[in-house]
Amino acid sequence: MLEVLAAGLKATLYAAALCSAGLALARATLSGAWSGDEGPLQTLARWAGAALAASASLSAVLFVIRLGNYWDVATLGAIFLSPLGLALSLHFVAGVWFASGASGLAGIVAALAIITALAGSGHAAAKSAPLALLMALHVAAAAWWVGGLWLLLRASRTQNGADFAKVVVRFSAQALWVIGGLAVTGAATAGWLLEFSFDPGRDYDRSLALKVTLVAALLAAATYNKFVLTPRIVNKLSAQTALRRSIIGEMSVIACILAATASLTTFTSPHHAPAAGTEVIAVSGPIDIIDPWTAPMPVGVTTGGGYLSIINNQEQADSLIGASSPRAARVSLHEMRMDGAIMRMREVAELEIASGERLDLSTAHYHLMFEGIDAPFVEGETIGVTLTFRVRGEVGAEFPVRRGVGHSHQ
């Protein structure tokens, strides 16, 4: 139930964020052609800002509840210093800013804050900084498109054919580049997240395929508007009506895309937990990383275990000699073993893997130990980890946070 509520709040947050940021961006680039009353657009931006601030606040409350419903200062500090907590804080500030009437340069600054928040949290940011930057460009393009559609819709209802045509022509010229950029960055981001390998048996891949289908339909509608309806605007009033209807259709498809995105980021992951009885090769090559995962943890816990299997495909033996993660002050190698009736744990310097052999780091023997965690791991997110091998060097992997069985340092 909490996950469904989280998805609904995400969809609302995405819609409000793109509307408020998009209106600021589109009004800035289309101001030379737009001569209508700014009042209704400013009112829309205010309402979108208020919705953004409200959805960010409710999402933060839900975040705390999902982590155990602890409200002490230390816990809240740890939560809001996590990437998601910082993003929600930035959304709240930008939303309040728009709700108070930010426009012009102030509106652009608030829009950039929203774009940073959207790109700085989620699967892309968890994978790498360059991918987060690519996502920022994608989000900026999507926001401009949404804002531009709102402006066109307003112009279609209030301006005559000639004035409306000026706005459409300006929008169309800019949209050719912006929407093209959106398509390129979206395709690159999706390919990067999937490591350029589509697996129809994986929930994330199927959900992403649905989103891509919706985006393709949206691009088809935009292409029709650009090359069929736009040239007719000046001479045919009926074309203006047809374009208005098409804009409403585009906005409806965008709403479906935002709902699909909220579901995608809430219920699935690019490296989601494998189904029972199956194994997922998260990284393949000279070193295979299989089924990496770590467990969610309650508030107040600062250590956690990391589990995976490693296959050495090299022609020589290798050793795992260390690990690191941006989410932990230190990641060490540990061994658990029974000493009579007592379970003992000790740190080990390295773990050797013979050529062609497999090393299992499980809840019952060898494992990684995350120490000094910046914020509790939440089920559904992914934790970036760099594994260091004596021969192979550094190998990066994403550890999905999911529930498992056995000892997990909680």
Image: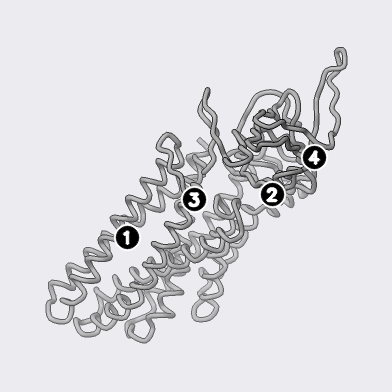
Q: Residues within 10 Å of mark 2 (few under 14, many from 20)?
A: many
Of circles 1 and 4, the one toward us is: 4
Across and down, in percent, residue 346 comes to 86, 30
Dot 3 falls on a residue whose secondary structure is helix
Q: Which residue is mark 4?
A: 332
Q: Is residue 266 above or below residue 24?
A: above
- The colour style of the image is one colour
> What kind of residue is marked 1?
Met
Query: Residue, x 36% and y 76% (percent of image)?
Result: 174
Q: Which residue is mark 2?
A: 79
- The reply to whether residue 163 is visible in this rendering is yes
Q: Is residue 142 left or right of residue 79?
A: left
Q: Mark 3 and mark 2: span between their CA atoms? A: 18 Å
Q: Mark 1 or mark 3, which has the lower sequence index?
A: 3
Q: Mark 1 or mark 2, which has the lower sequence index?
A: 2
Dot 1 falls on a residue whose secondary structure is helix
Q: Is residue 124 left or right of residue 221?
A: right
Name of the residue lying farthest toward the front: 315
Name of the residue lying farthest toward the top: 340
Q: Mark 1 and mark 2: span between their CA atoms? A: 34 Å
Label pair 1/4, CB-CB below 8 angstroms: no
Of circles 2 and 4, the one toward us is: 4
Q: Is residue 233 left or right of residue 378?
A: left
Q: Mark 3 and mark 4: span between their CA atoms? A: 35 Å
Q: Mark 1 or mark 4, which has the lower sequence index?
A: 1
> What kind of residue is marked 3?
Lys
Quadrant that contains the C terminus: top right
Dot 2 falls on a residue whose secondary structure is helix
Q: Which residue is mark 1?
A: 251
> What kind of residue is marked 4?
Ser
